[in-house]
Amino acid sequence: MSRKWKKEFEGERSRLNELIFSGGHLGIKRFFALDEQAYHDGALPAKTKELMGLASSMVLRCNDCIAYHIVRCFDEGVTKEEFYEAFNVALMVGGSITIPHLRIAAEKMEDLFD
C-alpha cells in the first residue's frame, strides 16, 4: 500500500458527497453539517474527538469510517503511540470481532507514517 490511498480515498469521498448533496435534501445537508461540527475544537480538542470517532468506528466495524478517522487523526497530529492507544480501547470495547478492522486501521495508519 502507498500513501496514494489517502488521496484516492479523499477524492472518492468528496465526489460521492457531492452526488448526495446534489439531491438538495435539507435534512441530509443538516446531518452532514452537524456531523462535521461535532469534531471541531470545544471542551475536547479536535484531536481527541477524532480518536474517539476512530475507536467508535472500529467498534461499529465500518472500514470507510475507520479510513476517514485515520486520515483526520493523522491530519490532527496523532502519533503512532496515540493511534495504538485508541486501537486498544476499540479492541477492549468491541472485543475480538474488531480484530479484522484493527488490522485494516493499523495498515492504513502505518502507511501514513512511511
Image (tube, rainbow, N blue to C red):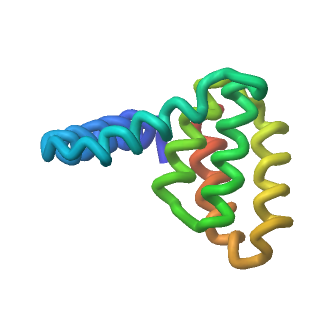
Residue 101 rendering spot, x and y as whole percentages: 62, 65
Q: Is residue 51 left or right of residue 70?
A: right
Residue at the left extreme, as displayed: 23
Residue 3 rendering spot, x and y as whole percentages: 48, 36
* Residue drawn at point x = 63 percent, y = 43 percent: 109
Label total for image: 0
- When the figure is inspected, residue 36 is found, relative to residue 104, above or below; the finding is above
Q: Is residue 79 visible?
A: yes
- When the figure is inspected, residue 25 is found, relative to residue 100, above or below; the finding is above
* Residue drawn at point x = 64 percent, y = 46 percent: 53
- When the figure is inspected, residue 76 is found, relative to residue 33, above or below; the finding is above
Residue 74 rendering spot, x and y as whole percentages: 62, 31
- When the figure is inspected, residue 79 is found, relative to residue 96, above or below; the finding is above
Q: Is residue 114 visible?
A: no
Report the quarter where the C terminus lies.
top right
Q: Is residue 13 left or right of residue 105?
A: left
Residue 14 rendering spot, x and y as whole percentages: 29, 37
Residue at the front extreme, as displayed: 27
* Residue drawn at point x = 84 percent, y = 56 percent: 88
* Residue drawn at point x = 47 percent, y = 37 percent: 34
Q: Quadrant of residue 44?
A: top right
Q: Quadrant of residue 72?
A: top right
